[in-house]
Image (cartoon, rainbow, N blue to C red):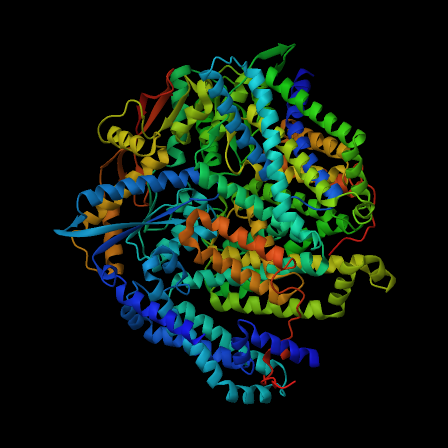
Amino acid sequence: MLNDKAASAARANSRFGWLRAYAADVPLLAWLLGVLVAVLLEQAMGEVLTDLVGLPKIPVLFGCMIMLKEPTLIPSALVYVAMIYGVPIILLGKLLARPANWIAARMITWPIVIPVIVHLVLLYGIMHIWSDLSLYRMLTLRLTLIAIMLTLSLNLINGYMGEFSCSHPGFMALGAYTASAVMVLFFVNDRLFGEALLPEMLGPFMFPLALVLGGIVAALGALLIAIPSFKTRGDYLAIISLAFLFIVKSLFENLQFLGGARGIKGQPDYADLPTVFCWTVLCVWIINNFVRSTLGKALNAVRDDEMAAEAMTVNTRFTKMVAFLFAAFWAGIAGGLFAHTVRFINPGTFDLKRLAELLAMVYFGGLNSVYGSIVGAVSINMLGEMLRPLALYKWIVIPLLLILVMIYRPTGLVAFKEFDVRKLMQPKRKPKNEV
Amino acid sequence: MQLFFQHLINALQWGSFYALIALGYSMVYGILMLFNFAHGDIFMVGAYIGFGVATALAALAALSALALPNWLILVLTILIAMYLTSFVGMLVERIGYRPLREAPRASAAITGLMIGIILETGNLAILGAQRIRFPSLIKTQVYDIGGVVVTNKKIMIVVVSLVLMLALNEFIKRTRWGMAMRAMAFDYVVIPLMGVPLNTIASLTFALGSALAAAAGILFAVAYPVLDPYIGITYGWKAFVAAILGGRGSVKGACLAGFLLGFIEIFVGAYLSSSLRDLIAYSIILLILVFRPHGFFGEPHSAKLRL
Amino acid sequence: MRKGLLFVIAILVLGLALSPCVWAKSKTIKVGINAPITGDIPKVGEGSKYAAEMWLEDIQAAGGLDVGGVKYMVDVVVEDNESKPESAAKAATKLITEDEVLAIVGPQASSQAIPAGEMANNYGTPMISPWSTNPDTTKDRPFVFRGCFLDPFQGPVVANFIKDEFGFKKAAVLYDIASDYPKGLAEVFKEAWEKLNGPGSVVAFESFTTKDADFSSQLTNIINSGAEVLFTPQYYNEVALIVQQAHELGFKAPIVGSDSWGSAETVKLCGEDCYGLFFSTHYAAAGATGATKEFITRYEKKYGYTPDDVGALTWDALRIVQTAIENTGKLTGNLEKDRMAVKDALAKIKEFDGITGKMTFTPDGDPIKCAVIVRISEKGEFEFYKSACP
């Protein structure tokens, strides 16, 4: 305890310490309210303010693109971002801290579901209002949410289990193809599958089923890898999964009834923001519960020392299999959502480059951490969009950044951190300064 | 029967690339227990350096009275490019691997992957998008031996790769450095305590692997003279499969697995189905791994992995 | 710290005062280019970008685009799609909603053009893909057009040409199964050839996967099948390897290709091995006349190499967009209406005289245009040999 306080005091003296100290007593609820006000403000005042500061258009991703494209507009963009996001969030967060703390303290005594739902509704509201201003934001946001699912599920294998799996794009492909095939077969008049078999109104109800089916197919695919590779410990999962990726890609190239190299297009547009958001929340929630369960702890034990784990009655093979299949299941669902967001898939979508991208997100964010997966997926996705004006050099900047992260934080930005919902939502109090 | 021999010769050539690239992976993996995912791109860089050297030498030969015969240019190109590329390999080790010695193994693999992307994009940024034709230094001669067609290039490629592999084997078996490498592969925790410099050996490993990759790159460019910045990706990953299939840190195993991969790919394409080639070829690899989970020459290792 | 804050604020205020407030709201027409600058086919992206730069130069030299008597400034926004489907969709959406372009040219490859076309069609922005041959790109999408002919036209052209020219009966095909353009064309060719010469006349139908460099097993089988001609609808980098390896394996029969051969790179990469071979394409660079020749010379002068078919097709697509914008007669300033007007004008274009041939759009948004058969001469130039119209 004492150490903690000393550390916080030291932190307060460091460069961003004042910010930390400032934010110390602001609970999550207040931040969310602050951001909500900010996005509402943008909705209401964005146009006026852009005119005022001389920007051509509302900066879409926090002004980053405009700043890189037109250096002369950097001050305007900074002012805009500060006025719309910075000032309201920082001020409101602080102002609302007291009532929010009071509410949070109240809510935390109720069943956990209620505060969770309140926070999620706020979060969704923010996303909805933010992305309402531009279709581009909306698409980026949806793909980012899907990337969170993919990263988290890959983290389960590469982080929590400590193996190196390369087959995630393959699972994604299995899920994407299954879900697309079901949906296109039943609900779309298509070149591949002919007339729609079911009336369109059933579509939204079938969609979750199709996704789950995709997840199950992906998990079955994973079983194919899991059986041979978890017999012994070693790096053989790396190449078995890599071989699996080649096999899956080659399979879909040759399956003419699934479009072959031409792929499947025209998936119905069911993967809208609420749907993707719900699935992502579900995925985070379930995976978080999984890693905090006995099985999850067993998984960590297996990673740290397989023999010791075995000695402590952990069924190592079973544990690894379950985790692997579980990860593949979520990758399959994410693949299905991906297919319905982009509304086109072909075998080339799920190649080695996708693998590199997924690995980058996992290791950037941090191993063995739900936070980390979210941070990794969001930052790599957002960076990829924000740095668009750099064109070619984007692919030098992002890898360099990742190398730096790896060198200074070898396990990623937020590794080995538990995601505790209760702790996240609880009221915050200012730490006393006297030690 | 002559068809079979024709395929066999094709496979021999194709396999020698995989084998040469796989060696680089295998050494790094054997000694440092790390995946060097930048290796495929070092192969690409080697080919490009080879292109630069060959062009420069050819220009030099044309300018001065120095009548360098083409075969000599090729030999010099291979040697100079191997030398230069080994520095690229050492640089990769210095930037991406040495700072991460104590980190989880997978983190180093990711830095390797990222360095690979930087090499690709850097190449694209510097040389532009056009593909490059590697100068044809030796005139192709086609020999028809009883219906089996062989070219002088094919013979040269297979011979040079075999020579390089043997040379590496000798180096590791007979020299002091080689002995240090083998020792390090045996135990990289204790051996450095006995006075073997870990950093030097790591650099040497990367340098040797990269030199071989450069040789593979130039031989590849001689056989398939179209270069683009992305050639390294697919072959790199496939050779990675071969390297691990061969068994941990086994030079013999990596060579054998590289050739085997080439043979499987060519023969599946030839006799079963060229469109299902990857599907069948990698299913075979999967099957092999089911029965030999530690590769050809690997030993089951229970050493606790660092993560 | 307070001093620092003041300093920052001062700079911001100064910057604000000096920032160019006016240019944003001027009369500018924006045209988006959605091209693969990075990724698997950077050369294609480069060709598209260069063609767009040249086009913009022309417009600027003319003082802007004249629509119904009003001069508009034109801006080209190039967006990279990394040759990935989802990135192409993002790039298209960004161009539509953020850059507010009037029309989009690109993406080039079908796997990017299909998802990008979806966005363009949904959000009512006309889009022309100069290079995509997949029927799905334009099907049921009134806002999406293409600039090249479809496989079902080109396949029979080549089959007929081989039949008429050489009178062969047995053909072999080698194509990339993982890439939809070669695959589609290979299948159409097979069908057309078997219609001409009876079933089983395609004696070898071999494939490989994108990025392969060794075709020896396929070629050995092809040679062994006794084929009299090899048709390979591949991109120029693979053509160089295929032709060279075929010759090294002792294949002496002619090798015929498709419009994807139509790049200066083909000869540069392939060298003497490719001399004397035929392929079908949009235009012949060596025998070019008029506007085509002018374009090629300008491009060569500016960028140092002969333009690929992508460059020429992008140029044509941009010129079509330009014509359509001019044909609208008047721009209202309401983006939605203007986009609709441009789309209608595009659909109405008749007999557009492009450098890759005359074209008229079908209701599906596909052009009807002629193909030419080109022979690679002994000097490595593309000579006009024959022309075939639908």
Q: Is residue A413 left or right of residue C129?
A: right
Residue sitting at the far front: C3
> Which residue occupies 35% across, 51% down?
C141
Q: How many marks?
A: 0
Pick the front one: B176 or A258: B176
- The answer to whether one can see residue A333 in this image is no
Looking at the image, residue C16 lies above or below residue C49: below
Q: Name the quadrant of the C terminus of chain A.
A: bottom right
Q: Is residue A153 left or right of residue C66?
A: right
> Which residue occupies 75% across, 62% down?
A299
Q: Position of residue C103 (x, y in %)?
A: 30, 51
Q: Is residue A213 left or right of residue B186?
A: left
Pick the front one: A212 or B98: B98
Quarter of the image where one finds residue A68: bottom left
> Which residue occupies 51% across, 55% down?
A339
- The answer to whether one can see residue B82 in this image is yes
> Which residue occupies 62% across, 48% down?
B96
Q: Position of residue B7 (x, y in %)?
A: 65, 22
Quarter of the image where one finds residue A365: bottom right
Looking at the image, residue C77 lies above or below residue A105: above
Q: Position of residue A213 (x, y in %)?
A: 61, 58
Quarter of the image where one finds residue C165: top left
Q: Position of residue A368 (x, y in %)?
A: 67, 63
Pick the front one: A43 or A271: A43
Residue sitting at the far right: A311
